[in-house]
Image: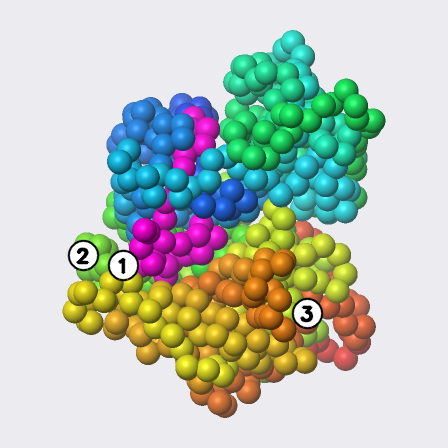
Amino acid sequence: MLAKNVETLKNMNATTSKFAKWYVRVVDPKVIDYSFKARGETVAAQKFECVLVSKDPAQYMLGLVPFVFSDRQAAANALTRFTENQVFEVTTPAFDAKARQEFNGCPVKSVLLLTRPTTIKPIPPTNKAMLEHPATGLEVSMDISQLLQLLKTAGSVKALNKTFDFCGKFLGVSNPKSIEKSGWRHEVSEAEFVDAKGGKVIVSVWDRAIPTLQSLTAGAGVAVVGCSATVAEAEVKLNIWPGAHICTIGAQAQSLTSLDASTLQTETLTATFTPGLNVLATMEEVAHPTCAAALADAVVDQSVTFQINRCLLDAPLQEELLLTQDNRLFIKSCRLRDRTGGVDVDVVASAVPALYGCSEEEELRAQLGAQSLTSTRVRFNARGVLRVESGVTRRYVAKVEPAPLKAVVSMTAMHLSLGLSHVTDDVVLAAPVGRLLDAPLLGLAARRDRGAPIGAHRVLLLVEGTEDTDCDSIDDTIPTSQQIFKVTSPNARCLLSDPVAHVTLTGYSDFKKMMQYRLDKERALVLVSAVTFPEPGSASAAAADAPCVVSVEHMQKISQDDAAALTESMTVEWKSVLTAPEDLCKEAYWAGGQEYWSPEKARKVRRLQSEPMSPKPSCG
C-alpha cells in the first residue's frame, strides 16, 4: 500500500514539494544537442530530457537535466540513469525556473529538474505497488482534428510560435531533402498522421527527429509531445524537431494502432492564424504603470522607469542562478507574471532578498549556505527600468514590495496599462471559483466571456471556511512536532462568486505552519496551482453542487476588513481580464510604440505602494 502523501503530478508545487512524494515512469528519454553564445563564443551543449507520467496518463510533464559547464557529461550520464519505462520515486522536486510555457505542450507546465535539490530514487523490481502506480504510456488530450480546430481559433500575433501535443496514427514519412533555413542547412521530411475521425495532417520532420520517425512502423498509434506550430504565409505549419518526444505505448496509442485507416474517409486539414549598469541610478522618482504583456511587447528609444502591481516573480533556488561569477546577487531571466501573462526580467541585487522573504542580502546568503532558502509565494509591486543596451531591450527589476491587501484599483487604468497588447497564457490572476477550468493543453485556466480560456500559471482565490479543516497525519508514529499533514478544507465559500459557490482546498503543511493552512471558518487569500473536477458518473459528481478541489500552494489568513477590501479590488482585477466592459477608455496605445511610454499618456505613480489612477477626462 502506498503512503498517504503520494500525489498527482498536477498537484506538484512549491508547498507540496516539501511534504509529498511522486512515482513517475520515464517515457522517451533523449539527449538534445544545441548551441548558445557565451563570452563571444559559440558553445556546443547538450541537455537530457524525457517525459514523466504518474498514475493518470493524461497528466505528464517534462523532466530535465540541463547543461552546466562544470559537468559537460551530465546529459549523457542521465541517459544511462533514466532509461525507458523505468519508475522512480520523486521527493523535494525542484523546477526549471527558465522554462517557457509557450514551448511546453504538456498538461503539467512545470519542468522537473532531475538534478539536486530534487531527490530521485529508482524503484526496486520487488516493489510491485510502486512499479505499477505510474501509467504505461500517455493520454494526449487532443487528436489531429481537435488540434487544427484549436489553432484556427487561437490566432494572435503572440500565438505564431507555440508547442502542442497531439495523438494520431502514423502513416509514413518521406525521404529527407536538404534545405537552407535562417542561414543553416537542415534535413527535412514530411510525415503523415491521421486520427479516428479521418482528419489527416502533414508534419515537417527536421534533422535528428527523422530517424525516430523512420524507425516507426507504418500504422502505429503515437502521441507526439512537443510539436511546434509556426506560420508561413498565414498558414499554420506543424513541425517535429529533435526535441519532440514520441510515445507508442499506452491505451490511447494502442487504440490508434488497431484503427483500420483504410475504412476512413480522410481529409487533409489545414489552419490559419489571424495576425506582433547601474539600474538604481537611472530610475526616476515616478514610474510608468504597465503590465507583463505590455512589458513583453515594449520598444523604447530611451530609458523608462516602469511599475507593475500585483505580480508574482518565479525566483530560483539554485545558487548558480542567484549569483554571478563574481559573486553578486543577480537573477537573469526571472519570470514575472501578472493578470495579463508573463515576461522575463532581470532582477538586480537590491530587489533579490525580498523575493525570499529576507530583509537583507546577508540573511539571504546565510539561508543559501544552510540550504534553507525558500521563495515567497505572495504578489509584489515591482519597479524597474526598461532600456536598450547594445541594441537589445533589457527589463530590470530593482525594487519590490509585497502588494498591499487594501488598494483602490481602477479597471480603466488596468486596461490602459495593457494598451493594445494581448492577454496571454501564463497569467497569475484573481478569479471566482466558477471561472476555473482544467482545460486541454492549458491545464489550470480561467474562462472568459469571449474567446478561448486563458492558461493560468496560478490563480488566487478569496475564501471563507464553512466547516472544520481536516488535518490527516502522513505518519502518526513520529512525534507531533515532526509530523506532516495533508490539510483539507471542505466547502469553503468563494467570496468572489455571485451567486454563492464553494470549493474544497487541499494542501500540505508541517506542524509549525499548521495554523496558516488550517482554514476552519476563517478567511484567507489562497494561491492555487491546480483544479480537479469530479469525474462524470462518480459518486462525488452525483452529489448536488459538488465543489471542485484545488491544490493550495500558499495561504494567507486575512481579517474581515481586508477581505472586504480584497473582494472589491480582486473583482475589478478579474473582470478587467475575463469580461469585456463597455465603459473603457478608448485612448489605448501599443507598448511597442513610443506613444504608450510617453509621459503624457499615463498618470505616473510615485510610491511603490501607489495604484495607477483612472485617466484624465479627455480619455473618456
Q: Residue at x 63, y 11 (%)?
A: 176
Disc 2 designates what residue?
A: 370
Which residue range is magenta in the image? 1-30
For the residues bearing labels 3 and 2, Cβ distance under 8 angstroms: no
Which comes before the other along the chain, label 1 or label 3?
Answer: 1
Type of amino acid under label 1: Leu
Q: Identify the secondary structure beneath mark 1.
A: loop
Work out whether residue 341 can be spotted: no
Label drawn at residue 373: 1
Q: Identify the secondary structure beneath mark 3.
A: helix
Disc 3 designates what residue?
A: 576
Q: Residue at x 33, y 78 (%)?
A: 515
Between the residue at mark 1 and the residue at mark 3, the CA separation in whole angstroms equals 35 Å
Residue 31 place in picture, x, y as percent: 41, 25
Residue 91 place in picture, x, y as percent: 30, 49
Label drawn at residue 560: none
